[in-house]
Image: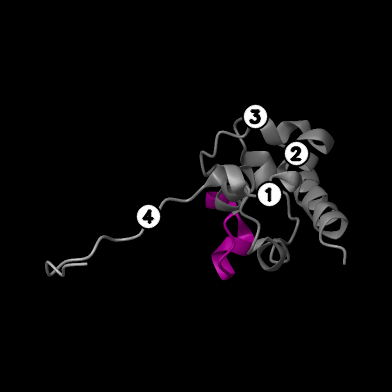
Amino acid sequence: MINFGYTINTDRQIDYDSNDKRIAAFLSENEPTFRICISCGTCTATCSAGNFTYFNLREMIVMLKRGETQQLRTDITKCMLCGKCQMACPRGVNTRNLILTIHRAIEHFERP
């Protein structure tokens, strides 16, 4: 091949269709309010844990819907279950139960 002085970059797109969406499906079945979240960020703005650590519930929900669960186990343990996010949510998402259901989903799907 002739070297023209440049190279073609590899594709950097994320293929979300190949991601594992089992946890998101489990959440939709066990906590129906998960589906009505519009990712407005009100939960993150009122989060007590987010003031002291890097905990972003909105980002976590978006990543779950995309099927990206790599950081889920470490991020979910930062939640203090105080309930401020649930009181502030304009859509009425039951975030406390959502967090507890995420814990159950992790144990269910990440068993050896």
Q: Do we see residue 92 in this rendering? A: no
Question: Which is more N-terminal, label 4 or label 3?
Answer: 4
Residue 82 location in percent, x, y?
Answer: 73, 55
Give x and y (percent) for residue 84: 67, 48
Residue 36's label in the rendered image is 3
> Residue drawn at (75%, 47%), measured in percent from left and top?
23
Q: Are marks 1 and 4 in contact (CB under 8 Å)?
A: no
Q: Residue at x 82, y 52 (%)?
A: 105
Magenta span dominant secondary structure: helix
Q: Residue at x 25, y 60 (%)?
A: 8
Q: Closer to the observer: label 1 or label 4?
A: 4
Q: Residue at x 87, y 55 (%)?
A: 108
Mark closest to the chain's N terminus, 1 or 4? 4
Sequence-first tag of 2 and 4:
4
Q: Amino acid at mark 2?
A: Ala
For label 3, the crowd category at 10 Å Cα-Cα, with few meaning under 14, some 14 to 19 and many 20 or more, is few
Q: Which residue is mark 1?
A: 20
- Mark found first going from the N terminus, 3 or 2: 2
Q: Nearer the viewer, residue 22 or 106?
A: 22
Does the rendering let one see residue 31? yes
Mark 3 or mark 1: name the one nearer the start of the chain. 1
Discs 2/1, front = 1
Q: Is residue 51 magenta?
A: yes
Query: Residue 25 got which mark?
Result: 2
Pointer 2 local density, CA inside 10 Å: few below 14, some 14–19, many at least 20:
some
Q: Secondary structure at mark 2?
A: helix
